[in-house]
Image (cartoon, rainbow, N blue to C red):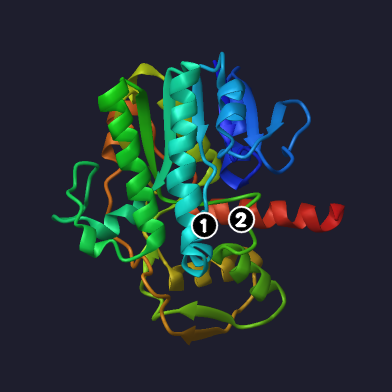
Amino acid sequence: MRVAVTGGAGFIGSNVVDALLVHGHEPIVIDIRPAHRRDVAALCIDVHDRAAMVNALVDCDAVFHLAAVANVNDAYDDPSECINLNVLGTAQTLDAARQAGVRRFVLASTVWVYNAADGHEPLDEDAAMTPREVGHVYTASKLAAEMIVHSYAQLYGQEFTILRYGIPFGPRMRTALAIPQFVAKAMAGEPIRIQGDGSQFRRYVYVEDLADAHILALGPAGANHVINIEGEVPVSMRDMVDAVAAALGCEVQVEYGPARPGDFSGREVSAKLAETQLGWRPTTSFEDGLRRYVAWLSTQSVTS
């Protein structure tokens, strides 16, 4: 397939591009930043440029829409920009895909949306959402984007897949994320600071496993489904500190600070549909993925 990847120069997008190439597809990177490799077509386009997006998506079989404000701290600091890119950017890309005749639109969403979910855990893709419980503009922007995708399916027959990511980690992670910050602090012999009491947890998913889920979602089984792509084991902030210490072979000190406003404390989310519908399940443990990240980081230090 010919597959466009908005945000294809970013952390997750670049790994999705790698997976597309491995599986014989033709990726096209759409980003305002340079692509991470030179053997792929890359277009410097802002997703708000409707005409340019339509031209870019002509003859594409699918588009993975990953361009977004992904850092929740950035979303908190500049909520209007979060809405502009995550909601309006999704609408612009989706409409460009419709006009260009793209068969499948794949939206990158997040398990953060379960902050607003009602029901017993583990929560699945059919969980009802309560607007007053959304709690964060980032979460609201992702739910709004999902609603727009559903509306395009109902009104225009636009085929879609929505992938709700667990917390991705691995090589090329943004340095602002918790794992790179924790690793950097530990390597420098500085205390690691945890926001909150450390009990909040995530189900981390190794980025190469996540990229493989995108490939499987391209098939007929992924059509018109919302699918959670989660790690298998919950990892608390305190667990993460212990794993960092083990991966680096050192002791680390921990300091605690106030919790972030609207933070996702962690909900038990089921990834059963990903296995039954797509045949996907994560194969990389958190500890193994963290070791791979540390090994990759050492190669970056040598080459920089």
Residue 72 coordinates in the image, percent (x, y): 48, 62
Question: Which residue is denoted by mark 1 in the rendering?
Answer: 81
Question: Which residue lies at the image location 72% right of the left edge and 26% below the top edge?
Answer: 40
The residue most toward the right is 303
> Can I make out residue 182 in this image?
yes
Q: Is residue 167 above or below residue 54?
A: below
Question: Which residue lies at the image location 37% right of the left edge and 30% below the top edge?
Answer: 161
Give the left or right position of residue 260, taking residue 115 as reference. Answer: right
Residue 165 coordinates in the image, percent (x, y): 41, 46
Residue 288 coordinates in the image, percent (x, y): 55, 52
SS state under label 1 = helix
Q: Is residue 250 above or below residue 69?
A: below
Q: Amino acid at mark 1?
A: Glu
Question: Which residue is denoted by mark 2 in the rendering?
Answer: 291
- Camera-side mark, 2 or 1: 1
Q: Amino acid at mark 2?
A: Arg
Please report whichever mark, 2 or 1, sits nearer to the chain's N-terminal start: 1
